[in-house]
Image: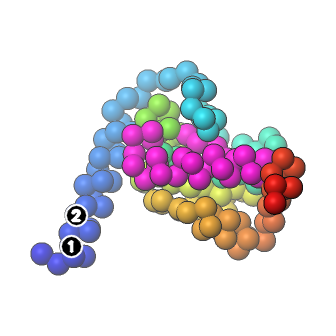
Amino acid sequence: MRPKAIIAIIVLVFAVGVVLALKKDRESVPKSTGTPLEQTGSADPAASATGLPRLVDLGSKQCIPCKLMAPILERLRDEYQGTLVVEFIDVREYPDAGEEYGIRMIPTQIFFDAAGNELCRNEGFMSEEDILAKWREFGISLEKGESHADTN
């Protein structure tokens, strides 16, 4: 079998698994604050009460690429506090969020400007450097928070 065909089969199996996981439990789950990265159940893609750019990551605590992104998201949240809002939504705990945001696979990162307009989305793992480059691409300058700006 050709490598492209194998990759296509793997992606298809993964996508079917995600869809089944999202449909498995449609019950409402109360908000969880037990994770280091604040998890929200907000499924309002236009919500931006802070007036700051916002990065929403939709994933799952069981997903390996999502687990790899967790420390990146925590670091971004901590280092850019006050200039960027970073949110994580576990689609297994909040299955309606996956539908509301129109995600096809996890992890998915959605970039919103300060007015709540979606700028772009990325499906799959995204490095910290790529996330910061994407903000620069949109002309959004992120300043590190005061507690981290003077650590050199």
Structural crowding at the residue carrying mark 2, measured as other residues with C-alpha within 10 Å and reported as few (<14), some (14–19) or many (≥20): few
Structural crowding at the residue carrying mark 1, measured as other residues with C-alpha within 10 Å and reported as few (<14), some (14–19) or many (≥20): few
Percent x, y of residue 65: 43, 53
Discs 2, 1 touching: Cβ within 8 Å: yes
Inspect the magenta stretch and tell me whether residue 72 lies in it: yes
Using the image, determine if residue 47 lies above or below residue 27.
below
Percent x, y of residue 3: 21, 76
Q: Do we see residue 102 in this rendering?
A: no
What amino acid is found at the position of numbered circle 1 in the picture? Ala
Which is more toward the observer, 109 or 35? 35
Percent x, y of residue 57: 57, 49
The residue that disc 1 covers is 5
Magenta stretch bounds: 60-89
Q: Tell me the quadrant of the picture where the N terminus can be found.
A: bottom left
In the displayed orientation, state which residue is furthest to the front.
152
In the displayed orientation, state which residue is furthest to the left.
1
What amino acid is found at the position of numbered circle 2 in the picture? Ile
Which is more toward the observer, 144 or 88? 144
Q: Residue at x 70, y 56 (%)?
A: 112
The residue that disc 2 covers is 9
Using the image, determine if residue 96 lies above or below residue 13.
above
Q: Residue at x 60, y 68 (%)?
A: 130
Percent x, y of residue 17: 29, 46
Secondary element at image label 2: helix
For the residues marked 2 and 1, what is the alpha-carbon distance in whole angstroms?
6 Å
**Image side of residue 143 versus residue 135, left or right:** right
Q: Residue at x 68, y 52 (%)?
A: 76
**Image side of residue 58 versus residue 25, left or right:** right
**Image side of residue 99 versus residue 84, left or right:** left
Inspect the magenta stretch and tell me whether residue 130 lies in it: no
